[in-house]
Amino acid sequence: MQIWPAIDLRGGKCVRLRQGDYGQETVFGEDPAAMAIRWMNEGAGQLHLVDLDGARGGSLANRAAIGAILEAVRIPCELGGGIRDEATIVDLLEMGLQRLVIGTQALKRPAWFRAMCQQFPGRLVVGIDARNGRVATDGWLETSNVEAATLARELAEEPIAGIIYTDIAKDGMMEGPNVTAMAEMAAAVAVPVIASGGVTTADDVRRLATTGVAGCIIGRALYEGSLTLSDALAAARQVP
């Protein structure tokens, strides 16, 4: 199972939010590129980047920080947040991002998203963020009536790279992941599922590894030191 350290960007800084609440922000670093180098040096095989300003405002807002990260590391990076048109997709892929995470537009403009999947096969990831099993959009500011598993099954028919499934209630709370929900999502689709939200301990990683998910994203636990990257990587290797 892959481990994806998260680097969330806001105002050019490396931050974390609690449950996606922009009013509950903690700054963990002034230099996102230095943070990316740290995770790479500690053994990360890939990085998960989020433009929080872009997710909220609807357009890319931390381009300079993203570019600095891509110049600094030699491992694949994916990015989500504010990716809502073809020009932005082209720009970001040309910058060197391995794949892009699209959430809000996959739900609100399904025909557009399907066209982008066909145009960029294997380079787009569906970001499904759920609150009580229903899809949240617009930087988690809105909650739809669409069931997360239903959306996942529909979009998994396209040539996507995978699905990132986030349980908002668990995100940034250091209370452990929603293992049941992640297992259900992994069973619902044939594409790789990356679990996100609440991973706090090595045991959390081991439990997720038994669900069939292809990987997990870890944020606050790494920054606050309750879980080291080396321990997370070791735990992921313990489950066949």
Image (cartoon, rainbow, N blue to C red):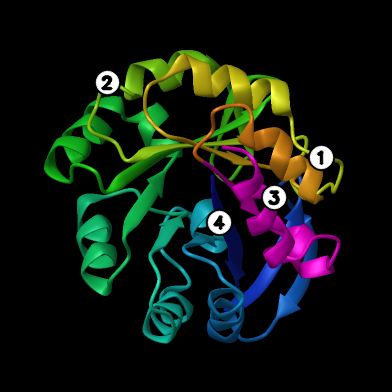
Q: Nearer the viewer, residue 198 or 116?
A: 198
Which residue does the numbered mark 3 point to in the structure image?
235
Q: Is residue 130 left or right of residue 154?
A: right
For marks 3 and 2 on the same chain, the one whose residue lies earlier in the sequence: 2
Tell me the element at label 3: helix
| Residue 124 image-quadrant placement | top left
Pointers 4 and 3 in contact (C-beta within 8 Å):
no
Where is 72 relative to 49, above or below?
below
Label 2: how many residues lie within 10 Å, few (<14), some (14-19) or many (20+)?
A: few
Q: Residue at x 80, y 43 (%)?
A: 203
- Residue 21 locus on image (x, y percent): 75, 50
Kindly identify which numbered label has been placed on residue 176: 1
Q: Please, what is the three-letter code of the amino acid marked with disc 4?
A: Trp
Q: Is residue 3 left or right of residue 152?
A: right
- Residue 70 locus on image (x, y percent): 39, 78
Tell me the element at label 4: strand
Tell me the element at label 1: loop
Mark 3 to mark 2 CA distance (whole Å): 32 Å
